[in-house]
C-alpha cells in the first residue's frame, strides 16, 4: 500500500520551517501532498493562486511532492486522497498540545489516519507565518524566513 501523507496548512506564506519539515519527511512517505486549506472565514494576505505557485516553485524538483488545495475538513480531504497520514511540524509544547487534540479527533472520525509529528529544527522554532506576514505588512524584509525560490 502506498504511503500518502497530507501536509495541510495555509502557507500564507510558506516559511523555511514548512520547507524543512516537508523535505525532511521525504524518506517516510511515497507521496506528500502539500495541501493549502481554504477557509472562507480567514483573511489571507496572499492569494490562493500565489501560495500554490510558490509551493510549486519550492518543490518543483521533488516528483513525490504534490501541491493541491481543498475546502472543508482536512480529514475528509485525506479520505478523498486515500491518505492515511497527516504530517505536522512541531515548534513548541503549545504546538504539540494543539496538534495532539486535533490528531485525536481526526483518529475518532477516521480510524485509519495517523498523525505524524516532526520536530522543527531549532533555528525555526520561533518562525511562523503570522510573524512573517506582520513583518511584510510593515515593510520589513522577510527574505531570511522564506524559501530561496520565492521572490517577493
Image: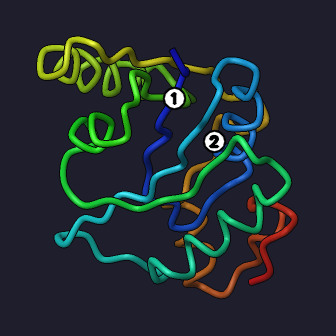
Residue that carries the numbered disc 2 in the rendered image: 126
Left/right of residue 65 with respect to residue 52 in the rendered view: right
Question: Is label 2 in a helix, a strand or a loop?
Answer: loop
Say if 104 sits above or below 73 in the image: above
Say which of 89 and 22 sits in front.
22
Most extreme residue toward the front is: 1
Identify the residue shown where x is 58% and y is 66%: 13
Is the residue marked by circle 2 packed among few (<14), some (14-19), or many (20+) residues within 10 Å?
few
Question: Is label 1 in a helix, a strand or a loop?
Answer: strand
Say if 30 sits above or below 75 in the image: above
Is the residue marked by circle 1 packed among few (<14), some (14-19), or many (20+) residues within 10 Å?
many
Identify the residue shown where x is 80% and y is 81%: 151
Measure the C-alpha gap from mark 2 to mark 1.
Answer: 28 Å
Q: Quadrant of residue 141?
A: bottom right
For residue 4, the mark is 1
Say if 86 sits above or below 44 in the image: above
Amino acid at each position: 500500500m502506498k504511503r500518502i501523507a497530507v501536509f495541510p496548512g495555509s502557507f500564507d506564506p510558506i516559511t523555511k520551517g514548512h520547507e524543512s519539515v516537508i523535505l525532511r519527511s521525504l524518506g517516510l512517505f511515497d507521496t506528500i501532498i502539500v495541501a493549502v486549506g481554504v477557509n472562507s472565514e480567514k483573511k489571507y494576505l496572499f492569494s490562493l493562486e500565489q501560495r500554490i505557485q510558490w509551493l510549486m516553485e519550492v518543490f518543483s524538483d521533488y516528483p513525490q511532492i504534490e501541491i493541491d488545495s481543498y475546502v472543508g475538513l482536512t480529514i475528509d480531504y485525506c479520505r478523498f486522497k486515500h491518505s492515511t497520514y497527516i504530517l505536522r511540524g512541531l515548534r513548541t509544547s503549545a504546538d504539540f498540545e494543539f496538534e495532539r487534540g486535533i490528531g485525536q479527533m481526526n483518529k475518532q472520525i477516521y480510524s485509519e489516519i495517523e498523525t505524524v509529528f516532526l520536530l522543527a529544527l531549532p533555528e525555526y522554532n520561533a518562525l511562523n507565518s503570522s510573524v512573517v506576514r506582520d513583518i511584510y505588512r510593515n515593510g520589513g524584509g522577510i527574505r531570511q524566513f522564506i524559501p530561496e525560490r520565492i521572490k517577493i
